[in-house]
Image: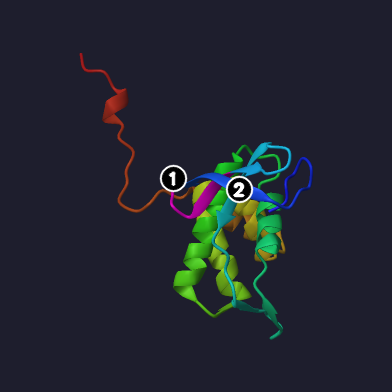
């Protein structure tokens, strides 16, 4: 690991801790040359995962590509970097459970949308509009109606707003 201050190649690990969700390790390091301290984050990386595109092409899973799509959908939305990292890790755990070696781009898109829907509904609609290629306003409206629909069996409690005399 190179020191970010002096670029020296020799550093030592001072402290290691797992992140609260247990999916990464944060290491506190010190440079052997300038003694400056800095932190690194080790995260799980999906290896040997092939994404099968709609046209049949196959390509290696690219975490950066997925993150760019998520950031584009979340543009000008309020979220913390740690929440974003957790979202990416949740999606990648879902990918591992679903398809350890190969996944279609359609399956990958659905996994992303499922997590994004719970994370930020506006970002979900943005992502879905591009991913599902909304052709017209009616398609967009249908997706919004589905998003706004209350879960079945849940009724609004009106008695709590009334006062008894």
Question: Quadrant of residue 156 in the image?
Answer: top left
**Circle 2 residue:** 12
Callout in the foreground (1, 2): 2
**Dot label at residue 20:** 1
Q: Residue at horizontal 53%, vertical 60%? A: 91
Give the image location of residue 7, x and y in percent: 78, 47
Q: Quadrant of the C terminus?
A: top left
> Callout 2 environment at 10 Å: few (<14), some (14 to 19), or many (20+)?
some
**Quick check: 15 left or right of 81?**
left
Q: Which residues are magenta?
A: 21-28
Can you say whether 105 is above or below 163 in the image? below
For this orientation, the residue located farthest to the top is 165
Say which of 23 and 135 sits in front: 23
Q: Is residue 114 visible?
A: no
> Callout 1 environment at 10 Å: few (<14), some (14 to 19), or many (20+)?
few
Give the image location of residue 54, x and y in percent: 68, 80
Q: Main secondary structure of the magenta part?
A: strand
Question: Quadrant of residue 5 in the image?
Answer: top right
Whether residue 96 is in magenta: the answer is no
Give the image location of residue 36, x and y in percent: 69, 36
- Pointer 1 or 2: first along the chain: 2
């Amino acid at each position: 690991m190179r020191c970010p201050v002096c670029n020296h190649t020799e550093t030592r690990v001072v402290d290691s801790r797992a992140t609260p969700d247990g999916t990464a390790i944060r290491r506190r390091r010190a440079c052997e040359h300038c003694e400056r301290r800095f932190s690194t984050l080790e995260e799980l990386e999906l290896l040997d995962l092939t994404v099968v595109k709609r046209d049949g092409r196959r390509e290696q899973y690219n975490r950066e590509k997925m993150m760019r799509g998520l950031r584009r959908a979340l543009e000008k939305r309020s979220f913390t970097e740690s929440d974003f990292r957790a979202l990416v890790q949740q999606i990648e755990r879902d990918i591992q459970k679903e398809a350890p070696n190969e996944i279609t781009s359609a399956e990958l898109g659905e996994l992303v949308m499922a997590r994004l829907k719970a994370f930020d509904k506006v970002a979900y609609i943005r992502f879905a509009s591009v991913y599902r290629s909304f052709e017209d306003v009616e398609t967009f409206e249908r997706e919004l109606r589905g998003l706004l629909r209350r879960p079945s069996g849940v009724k609004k409690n009106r008695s709590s707003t009334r006062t008894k005399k």
